[in-house]
Amino acid sequence: MTGGLTRRGLLIAGGAAMIVPARAKAETVPVRRNISSFVSQDWRDHFDELGKGCIVCDTDSRALHYWSADGGYRVYPTSVPKTDELTKRGYTKIVRKKVGPSWTPTASQMERFPDWKPVAGGAPDNPLGTHAMYLDWPAYLIHGTHDTRKIGRPSSDGCIGLYNEKIAELYEITPIGTQVRLI
């Protein structure tokens, strides 16, 4: 058939018609960054010196950045506070560490959740997971969690949470006195 439409011609034209709008759309739509993707941090933007080490907890990108005294660097996904009212920001430090921490609800938690009860260290339902590092702010910790669904989400009552295996790793390499900043 000369000058007429063929089945092959229709298939090629139809395929091209589907590709062109998709390509044009891809070129005009801005690329959106995943909300949970980590934002790069540099300890020098937060501290004057490394000292014993530095931790920056970035609540927007839900990541904990750790630098050791020798400049080694690691980043961990975290859970962050549910609301801005529960989020404390600023400078603090690690003052105590505990394997198998016990958990007692704070007074404000008891007001909001009167059925919450203390949980013994090592219990499988312990909200602090397997390890905890206490800050010099009362009731604020960096700790593990048994509920892995919380990581990467605003899900805590103020603390910074990590997977249990990640808090165990961080716990081992973080000395008491490590400076911390929550942003």
Image (spheres, grey):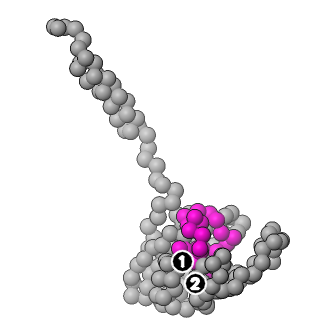
Residue 69 pos. (x, y %): 43, 88
* Res 5 visible: yes
Whether 23 is drawn above or below 115: the answer is: above
Element type where label 2 sits in the image: strand
The residue lying at 81 percent from left, 77 percent from top is 107
Amino acid at the residue labelled 2: His
Whether 32 is drawn above or below 48: the answer is: above
Residue 89 pos. (x, y %): 63, 73
Identify residue for label 2: 131
Magenta-drawn segment: 141-164
Left or right relative to 157: residue 22: left
Asked if the stretch drawn in magenta spans residue 149, the answer is yes
Q: How far apart are marks 1 and 2 (CA)?
A: 7 Å
Q: Which quadrant of the view contains residue 41?
A: bottom left
Element type where label 1 sits in the image: helix
Q: Are marks 1 and 2 in contact (CB under 8 Å)?
A: yes
The residue lying at 39 percent from left, 88 percent from top is 70
